[in-house]
Every structure is written in structure tokens, then in C-alpha cells.
Image: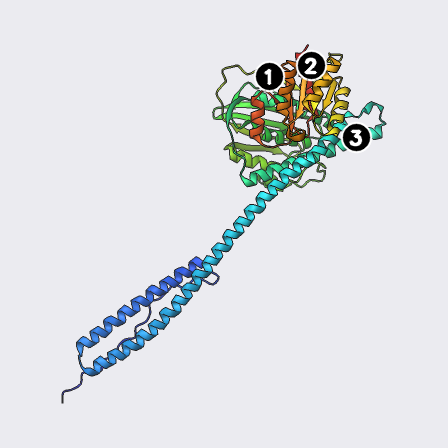
Amino acid sequence: MSARPPKRRAAAVRPAAVRRAPAGAGPTARLRQLREENRALRKTVRALMQRVEHAVDQSATAFSWFRAAATLEDTVRLRTEQYEALNVRLTRELDARREIELALKQAKQTAEVANQGKTRFLAAASHDLRQPLNSALLFLESLDERGMTPPNRELARRAKVALASLNNLLGTLLDSARLDTGVITPRASDFPLSYLFDRLGPEFAGVARAAGIELEFVRCSAWVHTDPHLLEAVLRNFVSNAIRYTPRGRVLVGCRRRGDGLMIQVHDTGIGIESKHLPRIFEEYYQVPMADRPRDAGIGLGLSIVNRIARLLSLECTVRSKAGKGSCFALLVPYGRTGHRPAPASAPWHLEAEGRQGARPLNVVVLDDHPDVLQAMAAILGKWGHRAVCAPTAIDAIVQLIAADWPPDLVISDYHLADGGKGDEAIRQIRRELDVDVPAMIMTSDPDHALRDRLQRTGLTVLAKPINLGKLRAMLESQRRASG
């Protein structure tokens, strides 16, 4: 009887080490771990098969074949169970991942719909609120303060300030919402900076006068290349803040030529900002702590909107300030190509510019489908020494002009008129029926820059609602001087 070969103890085959995903890991990490376990099990099975084949080759007896078969059966059964369990886990992980991705997609869609709804609501609310706000401001301006007692005059002044603050807040909220939705697309062009200075100067004249400070825009003949509407929004914020935070002294708006662009600067001699707050003033809702904060200081969105617009235009925005000494906010804008026609010389604009006393009154046509606006505009124009023809439609205005035998000097129309009519169409109708090329202005609360660009390209001046009365009065005085 042949001797049996010595028994060899097969070394245990252990699955390869698998890196465990940390607790709380996301679906991607768990899937990666399961796939690694799957690969490790495959390696283990291959190693077992090789060992069984090697054992059979060394001792090809019936017993060795039986033992190898039994071992292989047990191993296959064990590995099959492990594979099945692993597949179940993998399937669950994939299902969970699909559910998470679907939930995230639905949440994103819900957030986008809510954001769009918020923007539409703010736009509608802005328009609906600005209409009565415009009427209130016009009625207040039409009051004859000469007949008021000092206490009543002070109450009227405070009411104007409160309504102006409400208008600024509405504009800020709408600008923020439009930036959030990404609907603002910059449209850069070449234009003279003096055009903006000529608009902003008269606009802030009354505000600066009421605050008792000196306001000056220094002459600038340079042309720049950027979006004029967005640049105007930035400068308006800078000038508004400078006036608001300057209890006494001066606000100076000017520019300095540099090799890499034109540096537009707004200096003030106001309360200034401590250096520790400067890094955060462009954050949303951040307000510098101060004991004597102005009541119309806003909610801390203005400078954050400025910062976002500057990034949108790829412009550099800087600030220098010293507590108790004043501040300087600046924006570096690339130069633009000078137009074929020379830009009109812009003389230094000062706060004291006023209309001539005793000059010829203008015949001003006002078109609006709100009776309150018509009544208020008639009162205000009369207070400024002009004659107003107020009507809801172009036909009504034409009838009044013919009856009074008044040639129109200026037409001011709301953009949205009754029965779907449009202000630019009404202006063309008046010009055509009376055969006059009369200058005209459009009033609108619509923030769409494309609409404003289209109106301006047709030669119309656009007035944003609520109407800036200082700006309107300056335009009327300019028209009165032009008409002789």
C-alpha cells in the first residue's frame, strides 16, 4: 500500500482589503466603495480557482478531486451569497442615488420657478407702487409753500424725503432681483462721459440743496466704453450715498486720466468709514454701525449692487475713506473711441443753476391715463410758470391745443396709455396732425433697458418714474432757453 502524501494545509484565502467609506459619506463615495468590494471578490474567486486547480494537478486522486469539489462548492456558494448581497446593496445605492438626483433636480426647478416668480412680483409691485408714489411726489411739489406756516413747511419737506426714500428702496429691490435672475446683459458702447454728468447733475440738485451741501460735477471731455445705463446706476448710487452721509460740506464728481482707463471719482467731506469696515461695505445687507445713522440709509443693498454691476462690466471699483474726514469712491472705466461728431462741451455744473425769471412760458402737453398724474402735473407746471395741456389721449390734446390756439413747445407722455396705446405713437400723432417737430419726453417705470434704448434712438428723452422733479425742471429750463 502506497504511502499517502503528507497533508498540506491550504492557506486561507482572504478577500483583498477594501477602503471603507467614512460615515456620512455621499452616494458617490458609497458607490465607489461597493465597486471596490466587487473587484476584491472577483480577485478572491480567481485565487481560489487557481489553488484548486493546482491541488488537483499535484494529487490527482479521487479523494483529492472530491475534496477539491467540496471546497469549491462551499466557496462558490459563499461567494455567490456575497455577490448577491453586494448586488442588492449596489442596486439600492443606485436607486438611492437616482432618487437623490431627481429630488435635487426638482428642488432646483422649484427654486428657479420661485425666483422667477419673485422677480415678476417685484417688477409688478414696483410698477404698481411707483404710479401712486409718482402722483404723491407731484402733488407735494405742487404745493405753494409760501403760504404755509413753518411747521407745515417742515412736514411737507419730511414727506418728500420719506417718499424719496421709498422710491430708492423699490429701485434697489428691483435691481437686486434682476441681478439674481441674470436677465441683465451688458451692452457696451462708446459715449462721452459728459452725457451722464449732464443728466446726473440736475437730478441731484434739489437733493443736495435740501441737504445744505455744495454739489459740483467737473467738466470731462473723455469718451468711455461700457454700458451707459449700468454705469449711470453705479454713479447714481455713489452720488446718492455721498450726499446722504455728508452732513455739511461738499460733494465733488470728477475724473482722472490714467494709462489703463478713466478713473471716475466721487469725493465727499462726510462722516467717512473706519478702515475695519471697508472690506465688508460691498457685502449684501451690511451696514456700518453708527450712532447717527440717517433715516434714509436704506437696507444695505446699494453697494452690493454696485459691486455686482462692476463685476458684470469687468470694472475695478475702489474706495478710500477716513472716519470724520470723508470718502472717495472710484470706478476705472476703459477709454472709448471718440465719435465723429465732437461731444458737446460740458461746462462745470454747479448747484446754483436755475431758470431765468420772467422768461417765456412753455406750452407743455402732458399725456397720461391717470387723472391724479394729470392734475398734479398741471399744478406743478403752473407753479414753474408754464402752461399745461393735460389729456389722456393724443386726440384730446390736439383738440385742446387747436381750441386755445397754442403751438406746443414740448410733449411729455406716459409710455403705457389707455386701451393699450403707447406714448411714442401718441407723440408721432401729435407731430403729424399739427405738423410740428416738437421735442418730447417719455415717462415710464419699466426697467427694460432695451425699451429705453429704442425710445432714445428715436430722439425721445426717457424719464423714469417717479419723475425726478429737479431733472424735469432743468430740462424745461433748457428747452425754454432753446426756444428763446
Q: Earlier in the sequence, mark 3 or mark 1?
A: 3
Viewer-nearest residue: 418 or 26:
418
Q: Secondary structure at mark 1?
A: loop
User: Badge 2: few (under 14), some or many (20 or more) residues near its Cα, within 10 Å?
Assistant: some
Which callout, 2 or 3, points to the residue nearer the camera?
Answer: 2
The amino acid beneath tag 2 is Arg
Could you say where residue 442 lies in the image, as x and y percent from the top left? 64, 24
**Callout 3: helix, strand or loop?**
helix
Say what amino acid the circle numbered 3 marks.
Answer: Ala
Q: Residue at x 74, y 19 (%)?
A: 388
Judging by the rendered image, the residue that carries numbered circle 3 is 156
Coordinates of residue 484 in the picture (x, y in percent)? 68, 10
Residue 74 appears in the picture as rendered: yes
Q: CA distance from mark 2 to mark 1?
A: 19 Å
Q: Which residue is mark 2?
A: 480
Q: Residue at x 27, y 68 (%)?
A: 46
Question: Residue tagged by mark 1?
Answer: 346
2 vs 1, front mark: 2
From mark 3 to mark 1, how far is it between C-alphas?
34 Å
Of the residues shown, which amino acid type is indicated by label 1? Ser
Residue drawn 18% across and 81% down?
61
Q: Earlier in the sequence, mark 2 or mark 1?
A: 1
